[in-house]
Every structure is written in C-alpha cells, then in structure tokens.
Amino acid sequence: RVAPLLRLWLEEPFRTQVPDRAQDAAGRLIRHDAARSWSVLKSLMDKDAPFMREALLAGASAFDRRAPDLQAQDLAYFYLWMCDQLPSAEDPIFDEVHAVGPRESVATWRDALLTALAGMGTRASVTAIERIVKSRPSRGCAGPRPPAAPPPLPPRSCQPLSVDEIDL
C-alpha cells in the first residue's frame, strides 16, 4: 500500500520541497484513499487551500464523475469547499466544440459530487444536502439543475388493446 507514503509527501518539508509530487499525492489520495486519508486532506484544505486547489487542477484529467469514498457529511464539506475555491460563477462556458481543460474538468467533477451525494439516498445524505442548501441560500453552487420532470400523465391516458385489435 502506497497511501502512507503519499500522506508523508503532503507533510512539511516534503510538500514545499517537491510541490508537484505533493499535488500528485493529494490527487491520488482523493481518488483512491479519501476515507482513510480524509483527516490529512481536510487539514490541507483548511490550512493550505491554494495548494489543494492547484492539486485538483493539476490532476483534473484523472477525475471522472465518481465521487471520493467519503461519508455524506465529509462529501458535503468537500463540495462546499470546492464551491468556495472553484465557484461555479468562474466555470468556463463554451458554445462550440473545444478541448476540455483542467478548470472545466474540475467543475464537472464538483457538480458530480452533489449528484453522488443525492444518489446515496440515506438520511445522512439528506441532512448533508440540507446543510449545503442552508449554507448557500442565495449563492449558486448547486451545480447544473436537473431537467424538470415531465408532468404526470392523466389517468387512463393509455388504453390497452383489446383481443380483437391484436393482429394475429
């Protein structure tokens, strides 16, 4: 297991001596060992937000829409931190075909965190989402809005075929 070594690279003086290696370590821990490394990662988010922001951007191409393996309250904390560090108001907007850059990749991943949180379907995830909504009542960092559900069909809008109508 390499996680202990990766966590070591996030400590001083290693983090400042070889920042690229430390950023890579942070990205790998978020993707592959978030739950066990959360105390270290959260501490860096709180104490050295610019470093963690750069670590996310440096490893942006490796992020997919999979959320880190975190408890609901930790995932909500991470989402809110990303909203502060990488606000949706600064997300790039393109109207044409383009190469996806680091900032856009991280923005897509940030928004996928909220989707993953909603998909947990637990009481803890509902509480975490309520916390997000309360902390952002007027600021928009809730990610893209899902399309509105179609209106329900009126009763009896579909009539089954009778036996005589079936062409045998």
Image (spheres, helix red, strand yellow):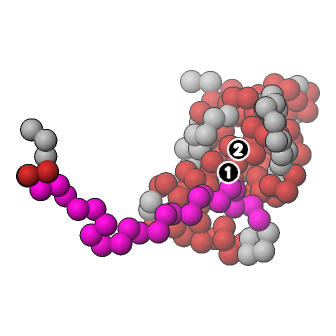
Mark pair 2, 1: CA separation: 5 Å
Under circle 2, the secondary element is helix
Examine the structure image and report whether residue 43 is included in the region drawn in magenta. Answer: no
Would you call the spot at circle 2 few (<14 residues within 10 Å), some (14-19), or many (20 or more)?
some
The residue to which callout 1 is attached is 111
User: Looking at the rendering, in which quadrant would you find the C terminus?
Assistant: top left
Q: Is residue 65 above or below residue 123?
A: above
Q: Which residue is tagged 2?
A: 108
* Residues shaded magenta: 140-163
Question: Disc 1 residue type?
Answer: Asp
Q: Nearer the viewer, residue 99 or 134?
A: 99
Q: Which mark is residue 40?
A: none
Dominant SS in magenta? loop
Q: Is residue 93 visible?
A: yes
In x, y percent, where is residue 64? Answer: 63, 35
Q: Position of residue 47 (x, y in %)?
A: 84, 52
Please check the rendered image and state whether residue 162 is part of the magenta-colored stretch, yes or no.
yes
Q: Residue at x 69, y 29 (%)?
A: 62
Please name the amino acid that badge 2 sits on. Answer: Thr
